[in-house]
Amino acid sequence: MALYILKRLLAMVPTLLGVAVLIFLLLRVIPGDVVEARYLTQGSQFQSQELMDLERKKLGLDQPLWKQFGSWMSGLGRLDFGLSMWTASPITEEIKLRFALSLQVAIMASTIATLLAIPLGILAAVKQDSWVDYAVRVFSIAGLATPSFWLGTLMILAMLIIFKWVPPMVFTPLWVNPWDNLAQLIWPALAVGYRYCAVGTRMMRSTMLEVLREDYIRTARAKGLWLKLILTRHALKNAILPVLTVISMEFAFLLGGLVVTEQVFNLNGLGMLFVEAISHRDYTLTQALVMLVATFFLIVNFVVDIAYAWLDPRIRYR
Amino acid sequence: MATLLEVRNLKTSFLSAAGTVRAVDGVSWDVEAGETVALVGESGCGKSVSALSIMRLVAEPAGRIEGGEILYKGRDLLKLSEEEMRAVRGRDIAMIFQEPMTSLNPVLSIGRQLTEGLEIHMKMNPAQARARAIELLAMVGIPDPERRLAQYPHHFSGGMRQRMMIAMALACNPSLILADEPTTALDVTIQAQILELMRDLARRLGVAMLIITHNLGVVARYADRVNVMYAGRIIERARAGELYANPRHPYTLGLLRSVPRLDEPRRARLDPIEGQPPDLTRLPPGCSFAPRCTYRVERCTESAPPLAALGAEHCSACWEAQRLVRERAA
């Protein structure tokens, strides 16, 4: 097992390298660069070519591509992401707080979603075709059909009208003031968590229904076990695997994919930063963000694979 | 001997798209303490449903026990609450299923699956349950039981899994085991081993057994008494030897003729029973075997014959049973 973990960790390196090459090239295919973007937004299109060339030289954009890539890679090797081309401040600083925010929303949303989805899915499966099942199905289909930014807008509107509460303009980190932080982030977490929970619930319900029809469940009943024990010990362990995959992929997606919801709740998360970085043609920042999200996906995927092996003894890795 | 289980006029039916299927249609039989009774018939004749009805494990809501009594030691199982019934399952009556490959939980260890019943029914602590589990595995002939406890079903072959199922069934010293086609899914060479094992253990431990099978060879060697089922009803009942020597129902006769026998001169070909078992949603008004029966008379298509006694411990549901006996004697 230890050898397998080591191998899997090493296998992440080529994957990340591929991601790096791809994003590096793709960014440079997009027309325009950071210098152009800056002068365009400042409304002075008629900057002299010399000044712009000087600017490009300062940022290293005049170097051949392989040299640019090489210096980026050697920086990555030392875990040095370099400076943002747009703000000229260290990327680590740029990302730090936003990463904390996005990660926290993702964790909160997935906690809420998982804690609701698993019991709801089991309940709906056990009480198949009863009113409980129908209620759960309506709840989850509504969740799939509701965009989280729209739900977020409704939440804000409701709180504005009832409590005169306005989403705060600045983000309070958990370590500064936990109460303010949670009061601020619980709403986006709920708005995002609803859809997430709906996906999980439907998956849980269908895998549970499938497992409950298995012969070994009948064997367990014939042994005179309590229903609760049959569900938790015999059925859940078999039914949870696909749910685990869905939940974890959704979790990884939340980290960088919440552009619109972040906008609605006025949160400066990674999603917003992504959009800004690309529109600024901020190569270094975009590259760093892509690498961060890719690494995150790989790690989540890896953890799920380990969890699979732990839950299902038939899966053994070499 | 005391009657352990008495099934009286049991009716179980299923709702299907085609209509109500009367899988078990007013069936009565009994099992005495320590004896082995067989329930024989073609697939779809209601044997398995009978066993599941006793355990009250008929798949709801499609399947439903519609009437009758199932008296276990005088107590009607159909009147018990779900919790009381749960306490009976595995403790008083245990069940062995047909498919050893799918009847064990793939993600739980052998030890876990053996000990859970002991912990619940016998209130054993984990150490006691483990000791008993080792004893049980040894009893069913699984070598190196201590190491096996930590393994999972996919480490076991089909025969080993069925041994494990037997160990699981015997765990809480039940007085009755329902074995639903226990060897059908196994290789022929393994079948005999498993059946021998079941018979020896049942004798040694004094457990009564209900063997459900379509295999008459199994019946001949392992059962004390036999109930032959056709289309949800019992059509003949006798002691095993008597049934083979003097079948009193054309269906039983047909079944026996369709099996090759080593103790008879080789015939050119077997005589299968012509036709198909009837559609259980649309049973004919008379005897359900009548359309396939060579002894059919007019009366057979008008009213169904009752299961009538034809001497000591032999019953048959056939209007023409006497003629059948006479013609066979001649």
Image (spheres, grey):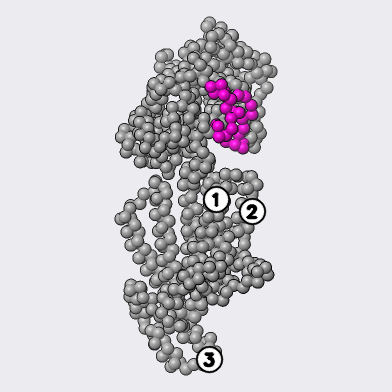
Residue at the spot 55% in from the left edge and 55% down from the top edge:
A116
Which residue is more in the foreground, A25 or B97? B97
Residue at the spot 63% in from the left edge and 71% down from the top edge:
A165
Residue at the spot 49% in from the left edge and 21% down from the top edge:
B38
* Label 3 sits on residue: A44
* Label 1 sits on residue: A119
The image shows residue A43, relative to residue B17, as above or below, that is below
Q: Chain of mark 3?
A: A
Is B120 covered by the magenta stretch? no
Do the dots labelled 3 and 2 sit on one chain?
A: yes
Kind of residue at badge 2: Val
The x, y position of residue B219, in whole percent, is 46, 20
The x, y position of residue B258, in whole percent, is 49, 20
Q: Chain of mark 2?
A: A
In magenta, the rendered stretch is B58-85
Left or right: B102 with respect to B230?
left
Kind of residue at badge 1: Pro
Dot 2: what SS? helix
